[in-house]
Amino acid sequence: MRLISWNVNGIRSIHNKGFVEWFAKESPNILCLQECKADLEQFPSEITSLKSHIMHVSTADKKGYSGVATFSQEKILDTKKMEKNIFDQEGRTLIQEFEKFFLLNCYFPNGQRDHGRVPYKMEYCETILKKIKKLDKIKPVIITGDFNTAHHPIDLANPKSNVNTTGFLPLEREWMDKLEAAGFIDIYREKNPEQTGAYTWWTYRGDCRERNIGWRIDYFYISERLRPFVKSVGIMPEVMGSDHCPIFLDLKASL
């Protein structure tokens, strides 16, 4: 079973850059997209009419902003949002129950350059942590998406110059520590503990992607008891079309 997560920075934009062909070629069992920036009626019909996957979306009240979408070949038993309007009105989360696990597709808030939205971001983080702790008592959890935080210095190209930048603030990184202390594993980093230059986002400014001056802010976190079923996990920097690249998680069929 292959899961892919990708912040596409606009579903309409990515559609014009070969998304449908890429999706057909990759054909993951589950695809999680973030920052779709569209109401459902604004999704290209070529995407909404796909027969290969069932699509669920959570869209923002504000036009052209935020939003997540999950496409699945696997049977979905239940779908929920955060059930907290300050987050659901921004279309940040889909919580779905599958036979063997819960899957959360999340677009974590950006704290903004002036740190004005850091409190909102941290409230979202704490709410997510409470939810997955409860869900983990029922079934294992996979949480994926754009976390908008680089956890450790190895996860960004210029850690020293970004200590006061949202996405690498001590407060944000401490929450990632709490997530791991609660029993959830950053499975990419566990499999690649010393891997440098492994980034998932690059600013469009200054040829940063070409020079690989980036941040790893997109993750698969999993419950500890899913660890034996992980076949592989990785980053797909060769896939263009957004300022983020996709990440993937392969689970064994014996799950």
Image: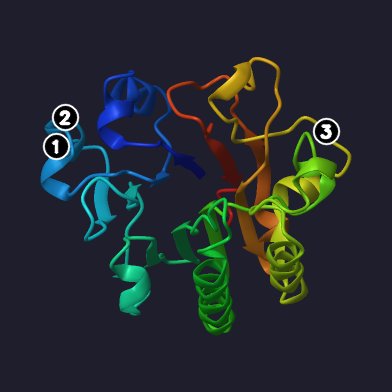
Mark 2 neighbour class, 10 Å CA radius: few under 14, some 14 to 19, many 20 or more: few
Sequence-wise, which precedes: disc 3 or disc 2?
Answer: 2
Question: In the figure, residue 13 lies in which quadrant?
Answer: top left
Judged left or right of residue 108, residue 224 is right
The secondary structure type at the circle numbered 1 is loop
Q: Which residue corresponds to the image point at 25% horizontal and 31% vertical from the top-left?
A: 12
Label 3 sits on what residue type? Thr
Tell me where residue 202 appears, x and y as whole percent: 60, 30
Q: Nearer the viewer, residue 144 or 103?
A: 144
Residue 192 shows up from this direction: no
Name the residue carrying label 3. Answer: 196
From where the camera sits, is residue 171 visible?
A: yes
Q: Residue at x 57, y 50 (%)?
A: 113
- Write down the quadrant of residue 213 in the picture: top right
| Eye-nearest disc, 3 or 1 | 3
Residue denoted by label 2: 46
